[in-house]
Amino acid sequence: MADAGATLLSRTRSPPFPVAPAATTIGTKTDEDLSRHLAQVATLGESGAIGIPTGAPASTGFRSAKHTPQEWHQSNYQRYYQSFSDRDNAERLRHESKQLANETEALTQRTQTDATKKLAERMNDINFWKVELDREIKEMIEETDLLCAEKKRLENALDATEVPLNIAQDNLTCRSRRQEVDLVGDRVELALNKEVEIIRKVQDLLKRTIENADRQIKLNRGAKHKLTMDWSDKVQAFEIDEKCTGLNNNSTEIQYKEGSAKFNNIQSTPESWAEFSHDNIVRAEHERLASQQLRNLIDQILTDTSNDMREQCNTVNSEFARRIEEMNDAKTKMENHLLKTVEEIASMEDNIRLLQKAIKDKEAPMKVSQTRLDNRTYRPNVELCRDPAHFREWFKKLGRFRILLTILTRSWQIPKPP
């Protein structure tokens, strides 16, 4: 707005229009009469010379081609009016220039103040996203460290499975050296084979989980790298805007920069700028959530695999204990039967010696009987009779053999197991 005292003169009054001068008297004639007289003398009309009288000197016509006092006054008043109009335009231009200078000064101050305010708001926005990015970076680093610890647990668990696997395989190898009927596919062998199978499956599962952990760690570090780059750019932009906010008209660093107001095609918009940081944070939160789920899965896998291996180990131990009990029972019974068999063998050896003695003791009676029978064969004629004495000697001989056969049969009879 213009000042109250900057009102133009042309807005209060208009310049006077030039008018004919008032009639004045020169001697005894007025200017109008004098002009008319001169026109008649010089044969001039009101509009100028129309001819030169005959016999008049040549210079008379040149001197008579003059303007009238009325034209002179009119020309002066026209110049007065033009001068007044030019001064009025100059005054108006000065007032408008002063008003324009004041308006541009006020507009410049308002614009500069608004730009400083916008820079401060921009710094607040940058600081907000910088804080959010820094928070997300710290959470991502913490989550990655936790996932690395879980990966280390998986590797330790994988290494720990080698000991029970070697034990189970050694047990199977040792049991394969059993001989004859003891080489049996019992429940212990089935439990050991199942334990080996479970341990191998656990190892495969742990290896796949370690690969998933490695992949997730790489994704976490990639997201963290993007967040760090964005945060670094935000820090640099914040420092630049902070420096720009501190600049004023009295700063020594200000200077003309040609082409600084030019827009580049690579420049982002406020919407795309905020969306870029938002997408980075959302992507990082997604990876962090996936990492948390993987850690929970790793805990569950370690718990389940440990329980499965422990349960199968207990099963193998139970089967071993049962088999050992069966083997001890069979061994005890075998030892008892062996003892009884050894005792029976000793008794049988005594019995054999007794039979041999008994047989030897029957040699003399056998000789007597055979001698009697042989002597009686020499009886003459009808005396060679099969009398009871003859049959007695014969049946006595057969009876001895029958008794001996019975004794031998009973002595060599194998006792039934209890």
Image (tube, grey):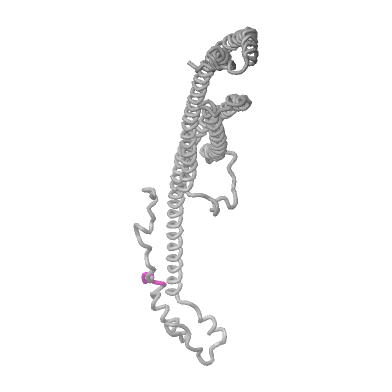
Please give the name of the residue rendered at 46% of the width and 41% of the height, measured from the top-left corner.
282
Please give the name of the residue rendered at 39% of the width and 55% of the height, measured from the top-left corner.
8
What is the residue that sits farthest to the left in this orientation? 12
234, 263: nearer the viewer? 234
25 part of magenta stretch: yes
| Rendered view: 313 above or below 269 | above
289, 391: nearer the viewer? 391
125, 189: nearer the viewer? 189
Provide residue 168's location: percent of width, then percent of height: 58, 26
Residue 250 in sight here? no
Question: Which residues are drawn in magenta?
Answer: 21-26
What is the residue that sits farthest to the bottom in this orientation? 54
Provide residue 295's location: percent of width, then percent of height: 49, 31
354 part of magenta stretch: no
Q: In which quarter of the image is residue 392?
A: top right
70, 359: nearer the viewer? 359
